[in-house]
Image (cartoon, grey):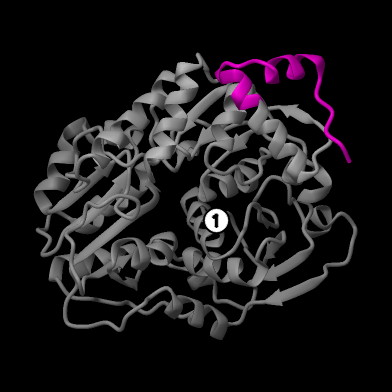
Amino acid sequence: MSLALSPQEQAIAAGQDGAGMAMRIVAESARLLGAPRLIPIASAHIDGALYHGDSGTLFAEKLVEGGAKVAVRSTLNVGALDLMGCSRIRLEEPQRGMARRMMEAYRKLGCEQSWTCAPYQAGHRPPLGSDVAWGESNAVVFCNSVLGARTNRYGDFLDIACAITGRAPDYGLHRPDNRRARLIFDVSGLSPSFLASEIAWPVLGSLYGREVGDAIAVVTGVASHPGEDALKAFGAAAASSGAVGLFHIAGVTPEAPGVETILAGAEPEAVIRVTREMAAKARAGLSTTAAGKAIDAVAIGSPHLSHAEFDSLERLIAGRRLAVPVYACTGRHALALLEQNGRRKRLEASGVVIVADTCVVVTPIMPDLSNGVLMTNSGKFAHYAPGNTGYAVLYASLADCVESAVLGKPVFTDIAA
């Protein structure tokens, strides 16, 4: 199937300016993906502004030099620097300068200075059924699954090209037929107390991603809405362990009022019945080391902490002094609320290191330790931290993370699956 561009799209692609370069990128991507046409998008979320090397900075500056501007609302994922000055970044020159130039280039392109991997909790919530072009795996899966907007997993630089053109290739999850569930992921065999706990959702997300891969499944056996932060944690872990772009939860997510609806009348290709043993194994798999006598740090906020999660953190610390730091990663939208009533000062006085605009897994912030042990309640952190930071990981609930930080040694409370 050949790609058909409209006369307007052809004219833009023929230009030698930044918009022309962006249109050629989108059009060539569409050809490679087998898309028959381009479709208009309502918004974009840009993951390509995180510094990985000089080429990314030079690419963004080339678009700026060509006069390019985003055509739709475009929020920015995390960068490599904490522009709010909350935490000290150990990135040295010339990398620091190139990272700053990159972030500035995306500002000049017209992107919102959101710098968060949770734009959906910072006011960027496209409506049900709208087509968008989002990057960053957790943002993509949340956008598709919880908001019911339609996006594929747009990679670095294609995301900004889509934002500039206001177009995306018509393929994949933009098409309703490709969004129906083909598998059932049944968690009815797990205890209600486990499903009601915060610790369950990164565990189940990690298991879901490994079992499902890039297929689309509907989760059954969830008695009530677990809350937005639980769905955020589930999707982030699923997108880290598998190529998940969309999940459904029967009776919870907007496209799955019931199992029959989202299966579209078809029989499921497979039913994955999650046992307590499977959940326990998945939970153990999120830790990469055995619990020892001490931990070196706690890191939370991948995806970025919400207002409600900061409320929980503050309540659990209860004014105590931490023996090891808790790195709390968040967006500037949440930081603004913490500035009220002295909350930020109280958290920092207790030993919390607030990290804004970025996170400890994508840029060097934590001390460089050869045998460091990091505790986290994030399935995504657990997946990426060993390779990106060099720290071994212990996975635990937020409550156990806080108690461990207070004592300086790992504490675990068992919540049986």
Q: Is residue 140 above or below residue 186?
A: above
Residue corresponding to mark 1: 235
The image position of residue 354, as x and y in percent, is 22, 45
Answer whether residue 123 is visible to the viewer in this image: no
In this image, 86 relative to 197: left or right?
left
Which quadrant of the figure contains the N terminus? Answer: top right
Magenta run includes residue 288: no
Place residue 372 in its image quadrant: bottom left
The image position of residue 244, as x and y in percent, is 62, 57
Boundaries of the magenta span: 1-23
Towards the viewer: 350 or 160: 160
Q: Residue at x 84, y 28 (%)?
A: 4
Magenta run includes residue 6: yes
Q: Residue at x 73, y 51 (%)?
A: 256
The image position of residue 81, as x and y in percent, is 28, 39
Q: Residue at x 29, y 32 (%)?
A: 100
Q: Is residue 341 above or below residue 64?
A: below
Q: Residues within 10 Å of mark 1 (few under 14, many from 20)?
A: many
Place residue 397 in its image quadrant: bottom left
